[in-house]
Image (cartoon, grey):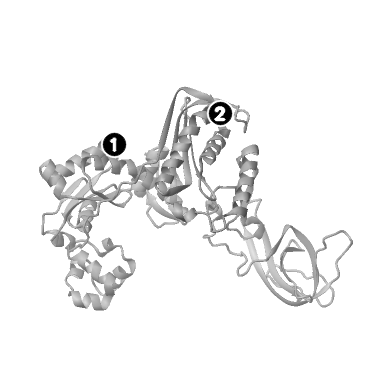
């Protein structure tokens, strides 16, 4: 039995979500970046040659006024949630395929509204009334054909029952979204879904396996998937409105305290814990303060109150006092869980979590007294020099967040590979490297040494004079580090690794005729 499906598609949803949440100018070319490449771009940017998959530099060369922002999938889901809620008010049984795309069983809405076209028009008008800029609807036999119908229209397209195979036959293979399979089919001379559908089922399964067999069913208009309605998640958001506005931190804390307890109790009653918290504050001057707070364990009511106070520090005349006066009164507070986890995953061990609890409690107390940034922890990031590969973040914030410019996923030519040194010197220490004749080893422009390194004088921890020279048993290098040569802050140096006669290993670099020890291998 073929299931009629209604698929709603909002083109460029990641761009639309950012425009709605961050209030950017819709006439400005905009692109979202993921892992150094363009993930999504606005229609205005596409008119100037920007497209998905380009590097940021290539995209900006095509469109110099392109505004680039990092892609955040949480924004897509968060902005699409009210859209889904609005759809469920008129058409229950929504399956979210991805943010910006959802499917509904067409039979029920068609009966209620008097036909498939009438149901689709009601859906489009509802979403356009919510401010969604572009809404397209496709109806066909199966989710796959209905989605392709939505993508091949400017507003509404209905594929008659039994005609899905014919409709799909003219489409290119790329709609299957299986890169390896599509590449192989094209090399075999197939160009459209119709060409693929003409192959026999047995031959497809034998040649392309189960993935190919499933794609073959889609190409023939025989999508076996039925629409599976989602179970609407429990809404844990807490909204607080204040009239008149509260202009003191202690007043706000008193007003939020009970709601924070109710917020955490509701999450706990559902068998969950809140591991990331979104706090939105609205002031009477129109200022909007919003931030997502992470937690090393999970939030309790006191943690929620602390985060509210820390978020207010930018709006407080005297930074950390509960009695501080705000620069502008707070009219609205919204508490919402950004991420949750199962409560069972955070239960205490058989013998309790004593040491971890005491450490967290002590550090949180210090933060409570001195401010959010009073306790810092190190996070490993990308970089060429070892000293550049750490960033200090406040205790409790997410440790998996890397600045975009220091992502470990980027290539870092000249960075140390393999096991890293155990001891990193706070500042590079000057050392001496000499050849067999006792002359200092120099490095010329062609990266050729004046002599093989033979003797090494390591740095001393005191001022008692020059360290005793040691023989060099083995050495490797040089590896150039040419960093930001176009800036005054750039540097050019050459790395070496050596093992001395005491079997101690060192990471050295040569710069401007001098030798320095960057770290040692313990």
**Residue beneath disc 1:** 130
Q: Quadrant of the C terminus?
A: bottom right
Can the viewer see residue 486? no
The label number, if any, that marks residue 404 in the structure image: none
Q: Is residue 346 above or below residue 334?
A: below
Residue displayed at 27% across by 75% down: 208
Write down the quadrant of residue 455 in the picture. bottom right
The location of residue 42, given as percent across then percent down, is: 36, 46
Callout 2 environment at 10 Å: few (<14), some (14 to 19), or many (20+)? many
The location of residue 15, given as percent across then percent down, is: 37, 45
Residue displayed at 79% across by 77% down: 501
Q: Is residue 87 left or right of residue 79?
A: left
- Pick the residue in front: 78 or 361: 361
Q: Under tag 2, what secondary structure?
A: helix
**Residue beneath disc 2:** 249
Q: Is residue 324 above or below residue 481?
A: above
Callout 1 environment at 10 Å: few (<14), some (14 to 19), or many (20+)? few
The location of residue 105, given as percent across then percent down, is: 19, 51
The location of residue 358, given as percent across then percent down, is: 62, 49
Residue displayed at 24% across by 63% down: 172
Point out the frontmost of discs 1 and 2.
Answer: 2
Q: Is residue 376 left or right of residue 430?
A: left
Can the viewer see residue 471? yes
């Amino acid at each position: 039995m073929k299931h009629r499906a209604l698929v709603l598609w909002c083109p460029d949803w990641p761009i639309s979500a950012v425009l709605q949440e961050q209030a950017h100018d819709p006439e400005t070319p905009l692109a979202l970046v993921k892992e150094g490449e363009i993930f999504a771009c606005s229609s205005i940017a596409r008119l100037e040659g920007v497209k998905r998959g380009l590097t940021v530099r290539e995209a900006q060369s095509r469109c110099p006024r392109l505004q680039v922002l990092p892609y955040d999938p949480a924004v897509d889901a968060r902005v699409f949630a009210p859209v889904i809620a609005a759809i469920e008010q008129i058409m229950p049984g929504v399956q979210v395929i991805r943010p910006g795309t959802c499917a509904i069983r067409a039979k029920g809405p068609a009966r209620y509204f008097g036909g498939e076209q009438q149901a689709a028009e009601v859906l489009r008008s509802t979403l356009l009334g919510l401010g969604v800029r572009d809404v397209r609807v496709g109806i066909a036999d199966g989710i796959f054909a209905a989605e392709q119908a939505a993508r091949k229209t400017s507003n509404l397209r209905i594929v008659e029952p039994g005609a899905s195979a014919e409709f799909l036959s003219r489409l290119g293979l790329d709609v299957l979204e299986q890169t390896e399979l599509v590449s192989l089919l094209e090399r075999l001379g197939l160009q459209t879904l119709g060409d693929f559908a003409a192959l026999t089922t047995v031959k497809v399964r034998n040649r392309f396996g189960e993935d190919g067999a499933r794609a073959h069913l889609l190409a023939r208009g025989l999508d076996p998937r039925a629409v599976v309605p989602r179970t609407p998640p429990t809404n844990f958001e807490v909204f607080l409105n204040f009239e008149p506005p509260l202009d003191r931190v202690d007043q706000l804390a008193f007003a939020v305290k009970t709601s924070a307890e109710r917020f955490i109790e509701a999450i706990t009653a559902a068998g969950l814990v809140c591991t990331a918290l979104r706090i939105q504050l609205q002031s009477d001057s129109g200022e909007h303060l919003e931030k997502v707070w992470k937690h090393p364990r999970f939030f309790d009511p006191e943690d929620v109150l602390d985060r509210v106070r820390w978020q207010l520090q930018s709006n407080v005349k005297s930074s950390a006092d509960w009695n501080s006066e705000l620069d502008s009164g707070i009219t609205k507070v919204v508490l919402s869980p950004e991420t949750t986890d199962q409560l069972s995953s955070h239960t205490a061990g058989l013998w309790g979590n004593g040491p971890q609890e005491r450490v967290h409690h002590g550090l949180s107390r210090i933060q409570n007294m001195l401010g959010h940034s009073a306790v810092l922890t190190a996070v490993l990031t990308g970089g060429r020099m070892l000293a550049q590969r750490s960033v200090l973040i406040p205790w409790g914030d997410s440790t998996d967040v890397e600045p975009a410019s220091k992502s470990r996923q980027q290539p870092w030519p000249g960075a140390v590979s393999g096991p890293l040194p155990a001891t990193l010197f706070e500042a590079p220490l000057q050392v001496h490297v000499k050849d067999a004749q006792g002359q200092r080893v120099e490095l010329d422009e062609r990266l050729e040494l004046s002599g093989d390194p033979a003797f090494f004088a390591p740095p001393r921890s005191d001022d008692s004079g020059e360290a005793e020279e040691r023989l060099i048993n083995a050495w490797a290098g040089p590896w150039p580090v040419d960093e930001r040569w176009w800036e005054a802050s750039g540097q050019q140096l050459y790395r070496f690794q050596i093992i001395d006669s005491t079997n101690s290993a060192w990471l050295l670099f040569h710069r401007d005729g001098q030798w320095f020890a960057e770290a040692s291998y313990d």
